[in-house]
Amino acid sequence: MKKKFLSTKEVASFLDVNEKMIYSLISEKELPATKITGKWLFPTHLVEKWLENNIINYPKKMNLPLSKELLIIAGSNDILFEKTINLFNKLNSDILAVFGNVGSMGGIQSLAKGICHFSTSHLIQDDESEYNFEYINNELGNELAAVVNFCKREQGLLLAKGNPKNITQIRDISRSDIKIANRPLGTGTRLLFDKTIENEGISKNDIDGYDNTFRSHMDVGIEVFSGRADAAPGISPVAYILGLDFIPLRWERFDLLISKQNFFEKSVQLFINLFNENLFKELSKKLKGYDLSLCGKMIFPSTI
């Protein structure tokens, strides 16, 4: 299980700096910390949030009105979801839907800043029994109107066709002959991967390629397909498309998070209603690896 608090040595290792730098970060950069019996302790979830909030080139709060002719979506990427955006644009000539692939956490933060209509997320919570709500509460509070499911999909390890390195379990990725491609911090796939290796007692320092990150599921899949990596955390639809082998880890929920301000916008409602159309259903049948039994249903407020 993830530790709730880190020591000075542990947070220095997490941030890849020396311990002396940590004291400067506390005073100069407001790194979250508390001092108990003469020792500094760092709440793990607040350190992670502090790191994400200090990403450079991340848009600050803009307070700009969103155009009714433009549907702005930010968050985690998904193959079926991006095809659905294309379908939406074909059917709605007066509204243009655009997507920013900034990861699940980036999407939630964009929604909190009011610079997108809704976000997409699949962040597993610490207790591993639920998705997204813990992070929504931290960033949005009571500004959330609804969580609508888009799909359920299977996360796991993408492997080269035929599994030439004979990778049979997650622990095998720490072998010296295995190199991986990874997803960036702030993505739901990276969060699940990090939790999985932590639960297995695997150190990231023992994984070749751990810091070699790629922005999309297809990008890491291509790394494995090309032979530049032996394995990568990813979703089963990528394995089906590229003809890769796949070790399943768990099914996850991929949700749309919508704020109170935007829920009744015409563009948002048109997008959600698209899930009931035959054209969308025909599109989804062309891709393997998805469970759409909850698609379009309200996860919050709960109706299921």
Image: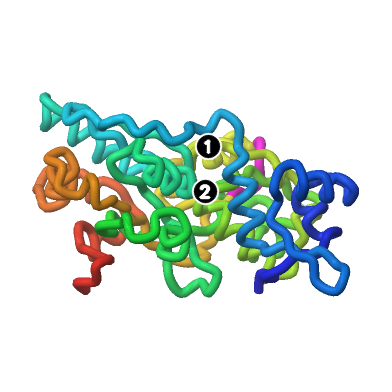
- Amino acid of disc 1: Arg
> Camera-side residue: 148 or 88?
148
SS assignment at label 2: loop
Give the residue drawn at x 66%, y 55%. 47
* Magenta region includes residue 230: yes
Observer able to see residue 156: yes
SS assignment at label 1: loop
Give the residue drawn at x 88%, y 69%. 38
Circle number at residue 187: 2
| Distance between mark 2 and mark 1 Cα atoms | 9 Å
Res 148 → quadrant: bottom left
Looking at the image, is mark 2 or mark 1 earlier in the sequence?
Answer: 2
Q: Which residues are magenta?
A: 228-232
Res 301 → quadrant: bottom left
* Magenta region includes residue 102: no
Give the residue drawn at x 48%, y 49%. 105
Q: Please tell me whether mark 2 or mark 1 is closer to you in this view.
A: 2
Q: Position of residue 86 (x, y in %)?
A: 24, 32
Q: Position of residue 275 (x, y in %)?
A: 16, 50
Q: Position of residue 155 (x, y in %)?
A: 48, 58
Pointer 1 local density, CA inside 10 Å: few below 14, some 14–19, many at least 20: some
> Camera-side residue: 25 or 77?
25
Circle number at residue 215: 1
Circle number at residue 109: none
> Camera-side residue: 242 or 274?
274
